[in-house]
């Protein structure tokens, strides 16, 4: 039986294509059963709207703006979350002080955060702020767990031989935390896009996928709403795939 990586990838692609075909079939059947394009347009109708929409300058500008917001939110949550998480793992008192803050952020509904942010920031920054708050606890928790995953025997040996703290951090703690950080980042990047688009729908910045989606909804252009949503899904999926690919390559080269 052929079990090479290439054949495994081919089987995975075939399974993914079959799953997508089944999803489209269910969508088509549901649209036919509904019989109302304004409620559930058919895949063909949405595809036509997407082809017409995606070639317009407005869509490209909106896509770029949403991409930059998602990238900013993920970057900020990663930098600050990793710093706070590592400090939390290395300093238990700091971790105890940070815990109720993370709990409060996790417990707050996204809609409430967006509404509060609307009082504080301009519309274009609201999605960034909201997505940052949603992704920050994920990264902080992952970094804290990773920092505590280091083999205690190695730490004791490093202490016995008086290895500098900087070397202990770079050569022991960071490599041990890598798998936790990658898993946390994969979750954070996915939630960042979702929250950014949700924040755009409510805050309505001038350029945004969420703004286009909301405008189409108000005009009762259901197929266009689906086309905007598909663009957001594709942006999220491509980002997660790119990140996973980069992480695998880095692991393969021992980075």
Image: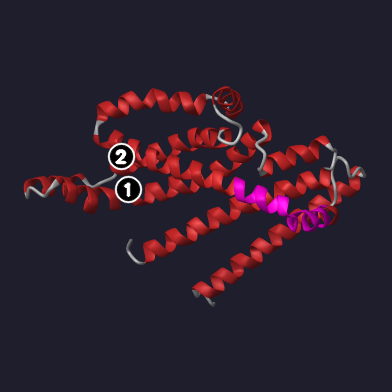
Residue 63 forms part of the magenta stretch: yes
**Percent coordinates x, y for residue 64 in the rendering:** 61, 51
Q: Is residue 147 visible?
A: yes
**Percent coordinates x, y for residue 14 in the rendering:** 65, 67
Dot 1 surroundings within 10 Å: few (below 14), some, or many (20 or more)?
Answer: many
**Label drawn at residue 86:** 2
Q: Is residue 190 visible?
A: no
Give the CA distance from mark 1 to mark 2.
9 Å
What residue is disc 1 on?
177
Q: Residue furthest left?
A: 161
Magenta region: which residues?
46-65
Q: Secondary structure at mark 2?
A: helix
Q: Nearer the viewer, residue 25 or 127?
A: 127
Dot 2 surroundings within 10 Å: few (below 14), some, or many (20 or more)?
Answer: many
Q: Quadrant of the C terminus?
A: bottom left
Residue 93 forms part of the magenta stretch: no
Q: Residue at x 86, y 47 (%)?
A: 31
Q: Nearer the viewer, residue 86 or 32?
A: 86
Tell me whether circle 1 and circle 2 mark residues in contact (CB < 8 Å): yes
**Label drawn at residue 115:** none
Task: Answer with mark 1 or mark 2, whichever residue precedes in sequence.
Answer: 2
């Amino acid at each position: 039986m052929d079990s090479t990586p290439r054949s495994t990838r081919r089987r995975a692609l075939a399974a993914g294509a079959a799953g997508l075909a089944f999803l489209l079939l269910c969508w088509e059947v549901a649209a036919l059963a509904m019989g109302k394009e304004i409620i559930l347009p058919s895949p063909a109708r949405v595809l036509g709207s997407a082809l017409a929409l995606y070639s317009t300058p407005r869509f490209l500008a909106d896509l770029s703006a949403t991409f930059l917001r998602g990238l900013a939110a993920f970057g900020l949550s990663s930098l600050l979350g990793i710093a706070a998480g590592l400090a939390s793992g290395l300093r238990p008192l700091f971790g105890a002080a940070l815990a109720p803050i993370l709990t409060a952020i996790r417990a707050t509904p996204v809609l409430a955060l967006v509404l509060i942010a609307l009082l504080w920031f301009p519309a274009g920054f609201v999605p960034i702020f909201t997505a940052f708050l949603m992704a920050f606890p994920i990264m902080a928790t992952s970094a804290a767990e990773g920092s505590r995953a280091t083999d205690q025997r190695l730490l004791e040996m490093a202490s016995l031989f008086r290895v500098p703290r900087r070397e202990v951090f770079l050569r022991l703690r960071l490599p041990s935390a890598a798998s936790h950080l990658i898993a946390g980042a994969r979750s954070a990047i996915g939630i960042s896009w979702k929250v950014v688009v949700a924040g755009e729908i409510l805050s309505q910045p001038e350029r945004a996928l969420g703004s286009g989606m909301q405008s189409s909804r108000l005009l009762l252009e259901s197929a266009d709403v689906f086309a905007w949503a598909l663009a957001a899904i594709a942006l999220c999926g491509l980002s997660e795939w790119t990140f996973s690919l980069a992480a695998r390559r880095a692991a393969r080269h021992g980075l």
